[in-house]
């Protein structure tokens, strides 16, 4: 199924209405996983024509996605990644962990952006950043689409490396499922229980009575308030 290619429409609008010149597209991956970090990429692209086939990373085959990520890392003006660990997700909640990862990515850019285009409808970044949220921005905005592809490929590689380097993780199939709840992942959890790479505050442990005692309870009132809309990330 063909998709409309992303454009610089939002970037041009921000330039015209706010005077911003350096605009970063920001997207995350790993929000719905049960294991591994949540990863955010910030990408600055300018207004140049992007590589052919750029769109939301989820709409691209793994092989082409890996090829495109290599092209994009050379093509973008700059990019950086930020991660929030499973421990930080458990302690802070997903909303605050997303912000932490995004700030780490933005702070790692060589030049601070004047504005940020954030994929989705919820601004989890907030001030002091000037943020424009765009629903399906990973399909419609060049910078966000680039961030989407780079983040997905880099996090998938991290999870595959974790599987290959750790006998403890090998049974979970992280190289194939990237920490998401696949049948192999669920079966391994029932048999072996969670590893230190799992998110231990999440509700999947409620369905595993033999491992339920490992569940962590977040006690931060601030984190609980941030999560008032419900636990994020169960986008099966």
Image (cartoon, rainbow, N blue to C red):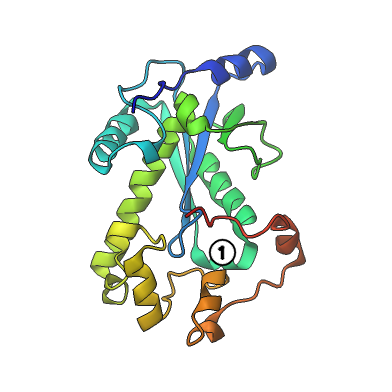
Q: Quadrant of residue 121?
A: top right
Can you see residue 28?
Answer: yes
On the picture, is 146 further left or further right than 26? left
Above or below, comparing residue 94 to residue 196 in the picture: above
- Could you tell me residue 155's position as x and y percent? 37, 51
Quarter in which the N terminus is drawn: top left
191 left or right, relative to 19 = left
- Residue located at (32% from left, 63% from top): 174
Query: What number of labels is visible?
Result: 1
The residue that appears at 46% across and 29% down in the rendered structure is 139
| Most foreground residue, 233 or 117 | 233
Q: Position of residue 125 (x, y in %)?
A: 64, 43
Q: Based on the displayed image, in which of its 4 quarters is residue 73 positioned?
A: top left
Question: Residue 23: image x %, image y %?
Answer: 55, 25
Residue picked out by circle 1: 88
Taking the view exactly as shown, the residue that stands out farthest to the front is: 1
Say whether residue 212 is left or right of residue 79. right
Q: Secondary structure at mark 1?
A: helix
């Amino acid at each position: 199924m063909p998709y409309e290619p992303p454009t610089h429409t939002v970037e041009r609008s921000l330039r015209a209405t706010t005077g911003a010149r350096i605009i970063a597209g920001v997207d995350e991956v790993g929000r719905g996983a049960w294991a591994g970090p949540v990863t955010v990429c910030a990408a600055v692209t300018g207004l140049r024509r992007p590589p052919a086939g750029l769109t939301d990373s989820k709409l691209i085959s793994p092989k082409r996605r890996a090829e495109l990520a290599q092209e994009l890392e050379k093509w973008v003006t700059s990019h950086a990644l930020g991660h929030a660990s499973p421990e930080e997700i458990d302690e802070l909640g997903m909303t605050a962990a997303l912000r932490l990862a995004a700030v780490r990515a933005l702070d790692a850019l060589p030049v601070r952006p004047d504005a940020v285009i954030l994929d989705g409808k919820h601004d989890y970044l907030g001030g002091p950043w000037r943020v424009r949220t765009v629903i399906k921005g990973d399909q419609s905005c060049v910078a966000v689409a680039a961030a989407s592809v780079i983040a997905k490929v880099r996090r998938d590689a991290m999870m595959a490396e974790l599987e290959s380097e750790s006998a403890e993780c090998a049974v979970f199939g992280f190289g194939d499922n990237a920490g998401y709840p696949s049948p192999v992942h669920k079966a391994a959890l029932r048999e072996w229980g969670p590893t230190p790479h799992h998110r231990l505050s999440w509700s999947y442990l409620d369905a595993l009575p033999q491992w339920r005692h490992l569940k962590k309870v977040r006690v931060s009132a601030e984190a609980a308030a941030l999560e008032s809309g419900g636990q994020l990330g169960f986008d099966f």
